[in-house]
Amino acid sequence: MKTICLLLFICFTGSCFAQDIQSDERNLPANRNRGNNTAGQAYNRLYEYNFVERKPIFRYSKDTLQNFYVANFIGIDSLASYCIEKGDTAKYIRVNFEFIIDENGTPYDGKFLSIGTTRYAGSSGFSKIKYVDNLKEYFDKAIKQMVRKIPNWYPAMQNNVRVNCIVKDYFQFWLGINPEPK
């Protein structure tokens, strides 16, 4: 009786764990018979950076990319002066944003996410700055302008097909002005 129940359980739940047929040369007849075009579906889909098989790669070094962000972000002066005015000094100011890298490696559609502070350069966490919320439109325009200038990347790959990929990134700069003692 236990064996029969186990076999029935395996038969009925097997489809839950089955994987979709991938679109490579070995499975083309199977995909034609099913009427699915998984290569086309992969091509038109937007993938998250962490969930793509081969991530997009910036053509130069990571340091070059960070320097590029800081050099081409037009809102850095106003952000620094605004943070100094509010007393956020002796900290790293971190600007979080996202953009899409298309199947040809061209970045587009930059979006401003948030601004935060952190005490250490390599820390993964940050405290969000809420007093810049009224400047979101300004920073969004600055991010869009910066993303238009970013050089091409090597595109992301999923099932050996170039795909669009969302990249969430940040840059930070040290605001090392000590406040006056009170």
Image: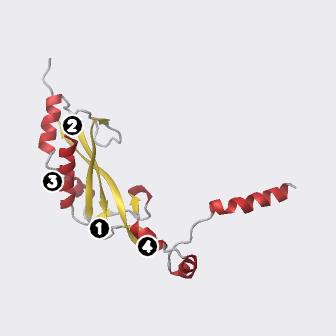
Pick whichever of labels 1 and 2 is earlier in the sequence: 1
Q: CA distance from mark 1 to mark 2?
A: 33 Å
Q: Which residue is mark 4?
A: 40
Q: Furthest residue to the right?
A: 1
Q: Are marks 2 and 3 in contact (CB under 8 Å)?
A: no
Q: What residue type is disc 3 on?
A: Asn
Q: CA distance from mark 1 to mark 3?
A: 19 Å
Task: Tell whether 159 sits left or right of 147.
Answer: right
| Image mark for residue 105 | 1
Secondary structure found at label 3 = helix
Query: Disc 4, disc 1: CB below 8 Å?
Result: no
Instruction: Identify whether 138 is placed above or below 47.
Output: above
Q: Which is closer to the viewer, label 2 or label 3?
A: 2
Q: Residue furthest top?
A: 182
Q: Label 2, label 3: how many angstroms apart (C-alpha)?
A: 22 Å
Q: In the image shown, does 7 or 151 lie closer to the viewer? A: 7
Q: Which mark is residue 72?
A: 3
Q: CA distance from mark 4 to mark 1?
A: 18 Å
Q: Who comes first in sequence, dot 2 or dot 4?
A: 4
The residue that appears at 55% across and 78% down in the rendered structure is 27
The residue under the point 15% across, 38% down is: 80
- Quarter placement of the C terminus: top left
* Residue 158 visible here: no
Please state which amino acid type lies under the numbered disc 4: Gly
Secondary structure category for the residue under label 1: loop
Answer left or right for 127 relative to 37: left
Distance in Å between CA atoms under marks 4 and 3:
35 Å
- Name the image quarter holding residue 116: top left
Label 3, residues with CA under 10 Å away: few <14, some 14-19, many ≥20? some
Q: Is residue 169 left or right of residue 44?
A: left
